Image (cartoon, helix red, strand yellow):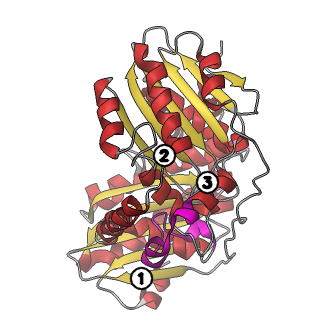
Amino acid sequence: MSVYERHTLSNGLRVLTAPLGHAQSVACYVMLAAGSRYENASNRGIAHFAEHMFFKGTERRPTARDIAMEVDSIGGEFNAFTSKEYTGYYIRCAGERRDQAFDVLVDMLRNSKFDSEELEREKGVIIEEMNMYVDTPRDYIGSVYEELLFGSNPLGWETLGTKATIEGASRETFLDYLGEWYRPSRMVVGCAGAVGDDLMSMLEGLVGDIPDGATGAPTAATIEETTEPRVRIHRKDSDQANVALGVPSYPVGHPDRYALQLLGTVLGTGMSSRLFLEVRERRGLAYYVFAFNNSFTDAGTLYAQAGVDLKRTEEAVKVIADEFKKLAGEQVPSIELEKARALAKGRFVLQTESPNGLLVSGLRREVLEGRAAEPTEILAGLDAVTAEDIQRVAQDVIGGSGLRCAVIGPFDDEDAFAALL
């Protein structure tokens, strides 16, 4: 039996629903296949900046306070998020408030004023967000790593943009970006939990008249192929070094996606993973260490990240690199594989227990791949992975590529780190 139901409005806009009979709340979403990789050199950061501006007021709800007061008055929670490839807006509330929640969401997305004074004020907010991000090495190391991996390709750009592009943004910058990418063919409305009746007719009235049109495609991903290690240091006086180390992997739709996921689980998910046991428990090199695979529509990367002792940073890099290489060199023992499989399946089940988690899981796949995979299909995919599959994938992605290593800390010698890899 299907968990998700897929509908299409008269203008081609897709609607994904996941009714849950026990739920009293409803998750109302609009998600788009448009994120920071859809930008160009002149409007970097506009996808995320627009996310902020949608909350600032419409003709019917003139100020940010008016919008917030209305969502609070229905006992709702609302927010948004911007990634490299998709952007999402949501309100979660009691089921009987569904129509009002969608009315607010759609009003924000269709009728925001992008008021010039509000726009200038928000530039300061974004720049402070940028400053906070750069000053938080645990967060910023991911950007240093992605810039090393993808270079000048938009996938290597920071989602927040640059201070120059944020300061230079005008009302027209927003309208041009939204006019190009915020089209029904790239948009999916989601509703999960207490979905209720007459949803489609209500949505037809709210968004069925948005005109569709051709939107083009983002710049294709580019990763320099190399068998030699690559190192990027972001020098910062700090009490801890932050390290990200990884390799290119597979895009989201790859046939070996589940083997790759379990490879990442064995390497760095949970307190029994290889990296946690070796880097933290046995050697005391780090407080936090993890690894996972991050896939885009046409590229991907398997990487590890850790915050490590300054005096033992080189040792930590060497230990992490060795754990990558071991996965290509020998098969994962069956006991370890079954533990990793149970962990990956359990985390997924926990995520999809709630209306919100279930819907976000489906929407990501629908937006990026054009199809929301059923939970049973994902669990079956994880069940089918063998130790041979994991080693074959490890040999392909780890054995065939030079390791990339990004470091934030008081260091200068990139060659010293490269020699460890």
Q: Position of residue 243 (x, y in %)?
A: 38, 70
The kind of residue tagged 3 is Leu
Label drawn at residue 165: none
Res 197 seen here: yes
Looking at this view, is 28 or 306 the one in front?
A: 28
Q: Is residue 58 above or below residue 233?
A: above
Left or right of residue 126, residue 304 in this image = right
Image quarter hosting the N terminus = top right
Give how far apart the Cα atoms at labels 2 and 1 are: 27 Å
Give how far apart the Cα atoms at labels 2 and 3 are: 37 Å
Mark with earlier residue (3, 1):
3
Q: Position of residue 403 (x, y in %)?
A: 55, 72
Looking at this view, is 65 or 243 the one in front?
A: 65
Question: Which residue in the protein does label 2 denote?
Answer: 265
Q: Is residue 239 above or below residue 351?
A: below
Tell me if residue 3 is in the magenta stretch: no
Q: Secondary structure at mark 3?
A: helix
Residue drawn at point x = 65 percent, y = 77 percent: 227
Left or right of residue 215, residue 109 in this image = left
Looking at this view, is 239 or 199 the one in front?
A: 199
Left or right of residue 408, residue 12 in this image = right
**Residue numbers of the magenta segment:** 153-174
